[in-house]
Image (cartoon, rainbow, N blue to C red):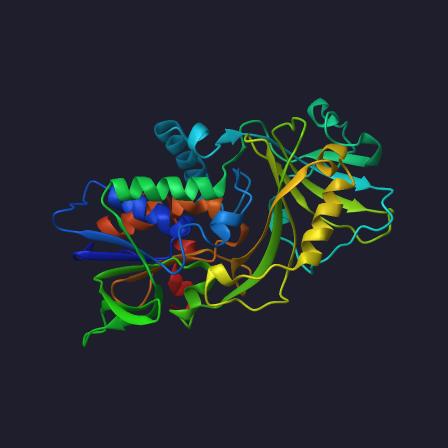
Amino acid sequence: MSTQADPGSSIVIIGGGIIGVCTAYFLATHPKYDPSKHTITILEASSIASAASGNAGGLLALWAYPSCIVPLSFKLHAELAKELNGAERWGYRSVQCGEITAVTSASKISSKGNGNLGKEHSKTKKGSKATLPKDLLSWLNPSTITAYDPMSSPGHTAQVHPRLFTKAIASEAQRNGVTITIGRATALNTNSTGAIESISYDDAGSSKTLPASTVIVAAGPWSSTLLPALPSSTVRAHSIIIRTKAPVSAHALFTSISTSPRSTAATPEIYPRPDGTVYACGATDSAASLPQLASNVSIDESQISALHQQISSVSPVLADADLEAKQACYLPNMEDGGGPVVGRTKTKGVLVATGHTCWGIQNSCGTGKVVSEMVWEGEARSADVRELDPGLWGL
């Protein structure tokens, strides 16, 4: 949706996750931003990267979805890493990526959870029983692996440490004039003409108001509390971080692990990181409702235990690793399985950027870039994102 660019003087982004932070960064580095005329504020309920952006895997892939924004975002990730020393600051690097099928001798492999992260829709499966790459022989147990399928071409998959990336970009946004305010947004307030004029928010029990001429709702699964018409849904995802005693190669793995060819398979994802840790995430569930704050997300210890057992069953190196963190977060999904939703809503001055599912880190830079163009130039210019227009969801 194209409209005349008139953001006014007070721009507020609701949400301090990677979508909100990248939006703030690209708004503040746009040539039309003038700190003597404009203010840009991130309004965050808990802390920067406190939700999914701090607990995600950080996989970047040209084979992700939706295709209208993936190439732009993948390219911007590489450019930001080069410009801002991302290899050192947030662990940016290219990785190999593949899928293993394994049958283990473990007495019981629990498949706790009732869903997956959704990445399987974009896998490039070769359909052949390939030989296990040499780099994986040093940390996987080859006797358990029945098949390996490469999932991407060289240079088409990369990774970041999502919490470090989000905090680094937030710091760069602040350096360019962005202000971060801690408070939980409770209402979008409009004037007599129906245009946005302020945001009500809760600050440790005290009700406050923040003036706003342009608002970008980028609060992930909490976005629907401000936009009730948003047809969103959410699921909880658990993950762990372990520190290995032996080196693990830069090879992201999607897995299917079972105790027999006909038993129910567990499907954890395993992402080694350059800091000597390994991130692993398991199945999703809907057993606990979305809490009011990210800081109140609960962890199901049985899910954590099952996940740890699953990855240990295919790797003695992972089995011998020290558990450093147990995590859980909620993913922002759309009820129809589509999304994300990016663009202007029917309320003048209000934009939305949410519903990025498991690809929020991957698509963060592209989302921030096109939203900044919508605000400053009236329309997205770097990518054709009409299929993400909020109007398609009735907003």
Q: Is residue 378 visible?
A: no
Left or right of 313: which side holds 35?
left
Q: Position of residue 21 (x, y in %)?
A: 36, 48
Q: Residue at x 55, y 30 (%)?
A: 274
Left or right of 360: which side holds 317?
right
Quarter of the figure with residue 128: top right
| Residue furthest top as drawn | 134
Image height of 344 relative to 268, above or below: below
Left or right of 317: which side holds 344?
left
Q: Nearer the viewer, residue 322 or 161?
A: 322
- Position of the N terminus by quadrant: bottom left
Q: Nearer the viewer, residue 66 or 192?
A: 192
Q: Position of residue 277 (x, y in %)?
A: 60, 35
Q: Position of residue 265 (x, y in %)?
A: 78, 50
Q: Is residue 63 visible?
A: yes
Quarter of the figure with residue 170: top left
Q: Residue at x 19, y 45 (%)?
A: 33
Count of numbered labels shown in the rendering: 0
Q: Residue at x 69, y 59 (%)?
A: 113
- Position of the C terminus by quadrant: bottom left
Q: Residue at x 75, y 41 (%)?
A: 312
| Residue furthest bottom as drawn | 192
Q: Nearer the viewer, residue 87 or 202?
A: 202
